[in-house]
Image (cartoon, helix red, strand yellow):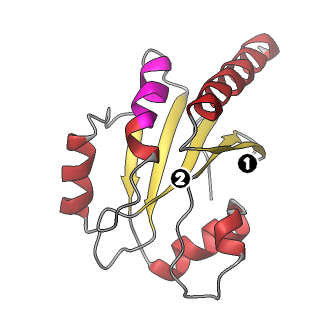
């Protein structure tokens, strides 16, 4: 996995299920960083059989996602689950068997070195505020390193 951007959010997406408490609130996050090209949101489906590219594109449009900074991603289920378990250490993925379906409201803040800088509950407004603050601090840290 290569991260091309200094700050990335990782979250689980299931369009065919009623698990969308986290996505509408991400509009607030997207707006907070609307002018910063170094900040990106990656939303991975954990149900690629249902969430095809057209389905994800329609959902991204519904969410008013800026498609240059907020990407709705699908792919091979085994690879997505492996990435969730071993790459991003998604807590909900750790508690499931290899091919079990999982959902998580956690939003993971990742830096350009692929380090997890925070895990935030995407259903809690105060956690979203904390996520925004942490991401701003991280971006400032990168700015000062130049």
Crowdedness near tag 2: few (<14), some (14–19) or many (≥20) residues, C-alpha within 10 Å:
many
- Residue 78: image location, x then y, percent: 53, 82
Q: Please report the bounds of the magenta region as a residue range.
A: 25-33
* Residue 51 in the image: above or below residue 117: below
Dominant SS of magenta comes to: helix
Find residue 78 and name its label. Answer: none
* Residue 108 in the image: above or below residue 15: above
Secondary structure found at label 1: loop
Find residue 114 and name its label. Answer: 1
* Picture quadrant where residue 7 is located: top right
Q: Is residue 131 left or right of residue 17?
A: right
* Picture quadrant where residue 48 is located: bottom left
Give the spatial CA distance, label 1 vs label 2: 15 Å
Q: Which residue is mark 2?
A: 11
Asked whether 10 falls inside the magenta stretch, the response is no
Mark 1 and mark 2 lie on one chain; the one further toward the N terminus is 2
* Residue 99 in the image: above or below residue 40: below
- Point out the frontmost of discs 1 and 2: 2
Q: Is residue 51 left or right of residue 34?
A: left
* Picture quadrant where residue 125 is located: top right
Secondary structure found at label 2: strand
- Residue 63: image location, x then y, percent: 28, 39
């Amino acid at each position: 996995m290569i991260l091309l951007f200094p700050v990335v959010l990782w979250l689980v997406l299931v369009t065919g299920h009623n698990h969308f408490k986290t996505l509408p609130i991400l509009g607030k996050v997207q707006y907070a960083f609307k002018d910063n090209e170094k900040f990106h949101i990656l939303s991975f489906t954990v149900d690629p059989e249902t969430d095809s590219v057209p389905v994800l594109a329609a959902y991204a449009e519904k969410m008013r996602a800026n498609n240059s900074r907020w990407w709705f991603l699908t792919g091979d289920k085994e690879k997505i689950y492996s990435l969730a378990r071993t790459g991003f250490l998604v807590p909900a993925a750790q508690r499931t068997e290899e091919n079990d379906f999982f959902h998580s409201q956690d939003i993971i803040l990742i830096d350009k070195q692929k380090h997890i800088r925070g895990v935030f509950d995407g259903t809690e407004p105060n956690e979203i505020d904390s996520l925004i603050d942490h991401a701003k601090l991280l971006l400032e840290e990168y700015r000062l390193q130049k």
